[in-house]
Structure formats: C-alpha cells, structure tokens
Image (cartoon, rainbow, N blue to C red):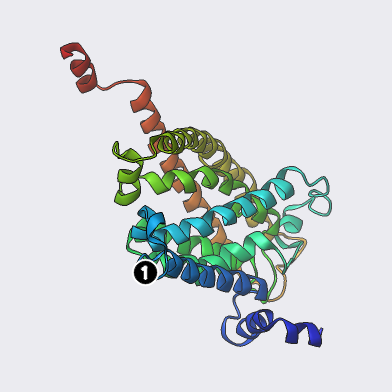
C-alpha cells in the first residue's frame, strides 16, 4: 500500500488534503475535483486562440474557451452519473437486501468509494463552483445557489458532518445519478442557447461555408431539445417529487425518530432536518423548472394571438 501511494502522487495528495485540509471531503471526491479542475485549466488554455490553437480551426469555442471547456467536462460527468444512477437505482437486484426499514435505508450503508457522491461533493466544490464564479458565461446566481445546495447535500450524505457515517445512501444513486439523465441532452442544447452569442450566431450564420454540417448540428440540437424536455419532465418534474415526498422525507423522519434504535453516534439531529429541508426545496425547484418547460411546449403547440394575426395578414 505504501509503495502504491508513492507511485501515485495525485492519490497521495488527495489523501493528505482529505486528512488535514478538507476533512469534509473523501479522498475520492478530492481526486475527482482536482482532475476536473486541472482538465478545465488545460482545455481553457488549449482553446485560447491567443496561445496555441491553430488558426484554421478557429470558431466559437475559441471565443468562449472557459465555457466550452466546462461543457466538455460536464458532458462525460453527466454520462457517468447517469450510468451509475440507472445501474444502482433501476437494475440492482440486491438493492432492497438489507434495506427493509427506514433506519436501514438512511443509516445502513457507508461507501467511501461511491462515485456519484464523490462527483456531487468534490467536483462541485473544487471545479464547478470556482469555474461558475470565474467564467463570465457561467455566472448565474440561481445556478450557483443550486450547485452550493447540491454540494451541501452530497457532503452531508457522505458523512462530512457525521463522523464519516453516510446518511441516506440508499437514495444517493437517484439524487446524484438518475436525475442527471436529462442533463446529457441539456449539456448539448445549452451550448447553442442565444445567451451564448458566438455559438448561436455560428449555428445560424447563413454565410457559413459548411451549411450541410450546420444542418446536422442544428437538427441534432432540435432533437436534443425534445429529448431533454421529455426526460426532464419524467425524471425531475414528476419522479423527483415522488421519490422525495413518498420515500426520502418519510424515511429520514422515521429513521431519526425511531423509538427502537437510536441515531448512530456522531450523527447530529440537525443533519436529518437539513436534508429534509433541502431535498424538499430541490423538489419544488424541479417542479418550477418543469412548469417553465411546459409553458414553452404550450407556446410551441398553441400559437399566440399575435402569431395568428401575422398568419392572417400574410
């Protein structure tokens, strides 16, 4: 073990940081966070047209290098989270083994090598939050609060405030896995949002030399918009509140107030109330975002009065 540590300085650094400087993060979460941050810096420099990027390949990715680098990292992370979520939430035949009671589902399992929780805590704290603060295109107050809230929930579930005892691990693969399925098409669609001017203009530029490629990119964008809306409404707009209010919150409440078993040593009562409050807020936020998507669908299906007048006049 000692030799392995010496041959892996990055792992050694992660263990040192977790032990002495960031005790609320596991070594795995620190390792993932550092990897994402280093990759962000590398891609940001690589895409900077003032440094080494070849002139013939210049495009909107060079005008928005920080944002592009972020999306290039976010997409594979969303795929990884979705994989673990689908595998552990829907396909694990042994998921219910040893999880027959609320107490078991909340306090029954501690897994320091859990990847989704490591991404939810380490990647968000070390990479995503600083990047969102420093990259102008990513500066959004609501999303920043959302990310901070996700980190606090992930850190609490990972035992950051309970002596390393995981809380609600049974539901971790849903909150940090299944719900990210809709984020896969979103990470593509988001690139061509009008607020990212250079990408939007590049996609819709009639003078672009390669219009055939632009049609393919635009067609894929339209498909991803539809897929995103469907997946979001299913897994976040409907299923998220269902899991939260029918499963997570009752389990947290009963586990922390179980008359036959006491709360594990080192687990403060406020962690239960904190998780109940935050998952409730997140559930309401998903419902709110879901209504916004439904409004957009309604506008597409049912033309407004102004659109009807335009058609009549034409």
- In depth, the one of 52 and 5 nearer the eye is 52
- In depth, the one of 47 and 137 nearer the eye is 47
Tell me which residue sits at (63%, 83%) in the image. 13
Furthest-top residue in view?
A: 312
**In this rendering, does residue 203 appear at all?**
yes
Q: Is residue 276 left or right of residue 8?
A: left
- Image coordinates for residue 266, horizontal then vertical, percent: 67, 76
Q: Residue 193's quadrant in the figure?
A: top left
Quadrant for the N terminus in the image: bottom right
- Circle 1 packing at 10 Å, graded few (<14), some (14-19), many (20+), is few
- Image coordinates for residue 262, horizontal then vertical, percent: 73, 67
Tell me which residue sits at (56%, 36%) in the image. 234
Q: Is residue 133 above or below residue 310?
A: below
Q: Is residue 238 above or below residue 135?
A: above
Q: Is residue 13 left or right of residue 151?
A: right
Q: Residue 20's quadrant in the figure?
A: bottom right
Q: Secondary structure at mark 1?
A: helix
Tell me which residue sits at (48%, 48%) in the image. 187
Residue highlighted by disc 1: 134
- Image coordinates for residue 263, horizontal then vertical, percent: 70, 68
Q: How many marks?
A: 1
Furthest-front residue in view?
A: 56
Q: Residue 314's quadrant in the figure?
A: top left
Q: Is residue 76 above or below residue 119?
A: above
């Amino acid at each position: 073990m000692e030799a392995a540590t010496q041959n892996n300085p990055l792992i050694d650094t992660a263990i040192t940081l977790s032990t002495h400087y960031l005790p609320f993060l596991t070594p795995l979460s620190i390792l993932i966070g550092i990897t994402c941050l280093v990759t962000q810096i590398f891609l940001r420099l690589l895409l900077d047209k003032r440094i080494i990027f070849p002139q013939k390949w210049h495009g909107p990715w060079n005008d928005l290098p920080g944002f592009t680098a972020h999306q290039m990292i976010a997409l594979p992370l969303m795929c990884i989270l979705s994989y673990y979520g689908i595998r552990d939430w829907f396909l694990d035949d042994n998921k219910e083994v040893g999880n027959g009671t609320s107490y078991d589902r909340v306090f029954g399992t501690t897994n320091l090598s859990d990847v989704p929780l490591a991404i939810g805590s380490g990647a968000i704290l070390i990479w995503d939050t600083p990047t969102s603060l420093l990259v102008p295109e990513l500066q959004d107050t609501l999303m920043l609060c959302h990310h901070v809230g996700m980190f606090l929930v992930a850190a609490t579930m990972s035992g950051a405030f309970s002596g390393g005892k995981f809380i609600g691990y049974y539901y971790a693969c849903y909150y940090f896995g299944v719900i990210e399925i809709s984020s896969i098409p979103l990470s593509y669609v988001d690139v061509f949002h009008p607020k990212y001017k250079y990408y939007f203009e590049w996609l819709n530029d009639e003078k672009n030399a390669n219009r055939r490629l632009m049609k393919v990119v635009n067609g894929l964008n339209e498909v991803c918009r539809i897929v995103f809306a469907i997946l979001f409404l299913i897994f976040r707009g409907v299923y998220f509140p269902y899991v939260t209010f029918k499963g997570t919150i009752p389990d947290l409440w009963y586990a922390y107030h179980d008359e036959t078993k006491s709360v594990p040593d080192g687990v403060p009562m406020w962690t239960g109330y904190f998780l109940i409050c935050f998952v409730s807020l997140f559930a309401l936020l998903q419902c709110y975002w879901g209504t916004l998507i439904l409004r957009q669908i309604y506008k597409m299906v049912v033309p407004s009065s102004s659109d009807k007048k335009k058609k009549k006049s034409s």
